Image (cartoon, rainbow, N blue to C red):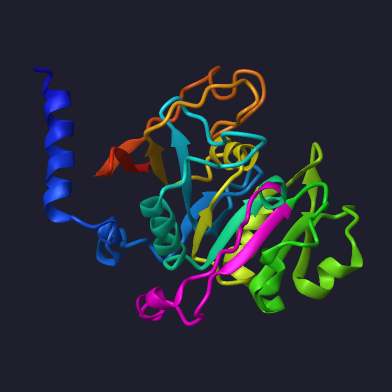
Amino acid sequence: MDWKIEFSRNLIQDSKNLFSSHDCIYSFEELALPVTGVNFELDGSDHRTAKRPYIAFNMVSSVDGKATTHEGKLTGLGSRPDRWLMKRLRSQFDAVLVGGETLRRDVFVPTVPPELLAERQKNFEKPQPLGIVISNSGGFPQEHRFWEAERDYRVVLIGEKTVIEPWVESRSQIFRFPTQNQQIDLKQVLTWLFEKLGVKRLLVEGGAALNYAFISQGFADEMFLSLSPHIVGGAENMTVVGGTGYGLGGGDLPKLKLRSIYEADSELFLRYQF
């Protein structure tokens, strides 16, 4: 028997023995996310550095790599353990970020349930993470539960010339950033989040285009990937990470290191380090 297969089976069996309930996938102690931020180099020849948040991604996909199942929706992929894990991860981050397209397609409400508040308050002053949406177009759905939170807990990041409806400003804090090739400058966004809003840990929940923008520019520290035991197929369904053409295939592909793996009802919960 191949030793790698045997290793994987043993690892999964160990996780079954240690964690009989999905409530215990990734204990708070195991997560142990950095709080000091990450150094990165700014543009220019003087090699100046700045601080950015520690960035993790949380995504779910089918076995064949699809992140949606029908008309951009997650129907059939997100299990109860996966949804609980999503809440636990959100409780350990300063802010949760999605792209505008995800907000338009998904019921994105980045709140921590009451049963996780005590654990969150050990590490965070605010009882809830900031909910952040970033968009180049600025077209947001008005009838969305995302806007039901207090204005101080909702942040909208848009380009300098992006036009938005007046109601958006009444429900969130609006911040504008320079754009390059019609894309918001992520370096400035991350520096600003760290320095101005005190975001030390940032959780990114898609979509595919936003994930690619972060990863292709080297703004990625780890990924939590729930591998749903389903096959979807379909040319129209999105993958976890997008990108144009052949994506990152023209250069050195990022190689991720597996940190841990858990299994519940044939669903795998993977944690990778970039």
Up/down of 98 relative to 62, above or below: below
Up/down of 4 relative to 37, above or below: above
Res 155 seen here? yes
Q: Quadrant of residue 199?
A: bottom right
Boundaries of the magenta span: 105-134
On-image quarter of the N terminus = top left
Q: Quadrant of residue 74?
A: top right
Query: Percent position (x, y) of residue 3?
Result: 11, 23
Residue at position x 18%, y 55% in the image: 20
> In this orientation, which residue lies closer to the viewer: 105 or 127?
105
Which residue sits furthest left?
1
Residue at position x 56%, y 72% in the image: 198
Q: Quadrant of residue 214?
A: top right
> In this orientation, which residue lies closer to the viewer: 67 or 133?
67
Q: Is residue 203 left or right of residue 7?
A: right
Residue at position x 52%, y 40% in the image: 218
On-image quarter of the C terminus = top left
> In this orientation, which residue lies closer to the viewer: 38 or 203?
203
